[in-house]
Amino acid sequence: MGMANKRKTIEESAGPGRSLIRPQTLADIERREPDSKEIWYGHSILTSTLFPPTQPSADTDFVSKTNGTLEYVLEAGIDPEERKRKFPYGKYPRLIMAWIAKQIRTAGKMKTEYVDPQTRTITIPSIWQMCNELGLQRGGKTADKIQEQLRLLLSSHITIRKTTGFSGGKMHDMISLPIVEAVRFKESDTNAAFSGSAFVLTKEVYERLARESAPFDTRASSLLLSGRSVLPYDTYVWLTGSMRNLRHDLPVTWDWLYERFGDSISSKQNFHAKFRKALAKVRDVYPSVHVSVDEKGVTLHPSPTAIAARHLIDGEYVDEAIAQDVPDAVDPVSNPTPNQYDSPSENGGK
C-alpha cells in the first residue's frame, strides 16, 4: 500500500480529533529523523510487558514475564493512599519508566534537573511537569491517574528468577529487585498537578535502564498508545530492540508471543487477530521493519532499528555500535556477557 493510500485509510478509520493528527504525524516520521527530545529508551520487560494492561483481579499474587532463561516477577505494593495492594498497569507506568530511562541515558555522568547519577536519584518536580514531559494533558483526571500510577509503580517489587536443571534435580536462583531504595511523595490536596516526588532507584534497576534500553521514537509511541490497547506499543518496543543485534532470520512461535504479549486476551485465536492488527499499526510508524507472519508465528528478518543507531551520552550523540551495551537477556546471577537485546529463541521461540 502506498503512503498516500495508507494515510487515507488511517484517516477514514480514526475517531474524531484524530483524523488529522495521525496522518500528519506519520508524514512527519517519514520526512525526518527524530530530534533528541523525541528519542526515548525502552526495555522490552521493564518499560513495557512486565506491567499488566489492566488491573489484575484482587486475588492475583503476582504477574511475570520470561526473557531467555530468566523470569521477571512483578508483585504489587501497598498504595500509601488507599492502603490496598494494587498493580501499576496500562500505559502510564510504561511511559514513566521509558521517561526515566531517557533521563538516565541523557544525563550520563552529569547531574541534571531530573537525575543525580551519583546517588541514582530521580526528581519529578511536579505532576504538571511530568505530564508535560510525557506529552499528556496537564490537569484533571490525567494528573490524578499519573499520580496514582507513579505511587503504584514505586511501591511495587520485582524479582528475577532463574531455574537450572541438572541430573537428579534443579537449582533456583533469585534476585530481589525493588525499584526504589527510598521515595518521597509530595501530594497537593487541591490539585494533583502540583504534586511531585523524588526517589532513589536501586542500583540494578538504574543500570538496566541505563545500559539495556533501546532507543525509540516518541512520535510513534504516542500514536501507538492513543487507543485502548498497549499491545501495539509493546510490540513496537520489542521489535526495535530486537533489531539492534539481529543478524539472521529469527522465527518466533505464537506460544511465545502469547506468553509475552497476551495478558488479558482470553484465547490464543483472539490473540492472533489482535497481534496482527497491532503489527499493522507498528508497520505504519516503523515501515522499515521486516516481519513475516504465518500459521506458526512470526519471523523477524534483519531490519534497521526504528531510529538511527545513535544515542546521547553526556549530551553528545555516540554511535550505538561504539557504546557499551548489555542486553536484557543477560544472566544477572553470573558474570554478564553481551548478548541479543531480546532473544525469543532462548524462550522457546523456535
Image (cartoon, grey):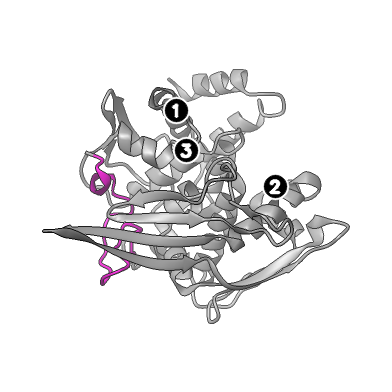
Disc 2 residue type (three-letter): Leu
Question: Image height check: is 26 above or below 247?
Answer: above
Residue at x-position 36% and y-position 54%: 71
Q: Count every numbered label the image shows and give the total.
A: 3
Left or right position of 292 against 318: left
Left or right position of 256 against 114: left
Residue at x-position 60% and y-position 33%: 228
Say which quarter of the image contains residue 26.
top right
Q: Which mark is residue 136?
A: 2
Residue at x-position 75% and y-position 63%: 126
Q: Position of residue 29 (x, y in %)?
A: 52, 39
Disc 1 residue type (three-letter): Ala
Whether tag 2 and tag 1 are in contact, CB under 8 A, the answer is no
Magenta region: 325-349
Residue in front for this viewpoint, 329 or 236: 329
Membership of 168 in magenta stretch = no
Residue at x-position 44% and y-position 46%: 237
Question: Image height check: is 76 above or below 23?
Answer: below
* Dot 2 crowding, Cα within 10 Å, few <14, some 14–19, many 20+: some
Identify the image quadrant of the N terminus: top left
Residue in front for this viewpoint, 128 or 73: 73
Q: Position of residue 80 (x, y in %)?
A: 70, 62
Of tags 2 and 3, the one toward the viewer is: 3
Residue in front for this viewpoint, 81 or 12: 81
Residue of label 3: 263
Whether tag 1 and tag 3 are in contact, CB under 8 A, the answer is no
Residue of label 1: 280
Of tags 1 and 3, the one toward the viewer is: 3
Is residue 36 in view from this perspective? no
Label located before the other in sequence (2 or 3): 2
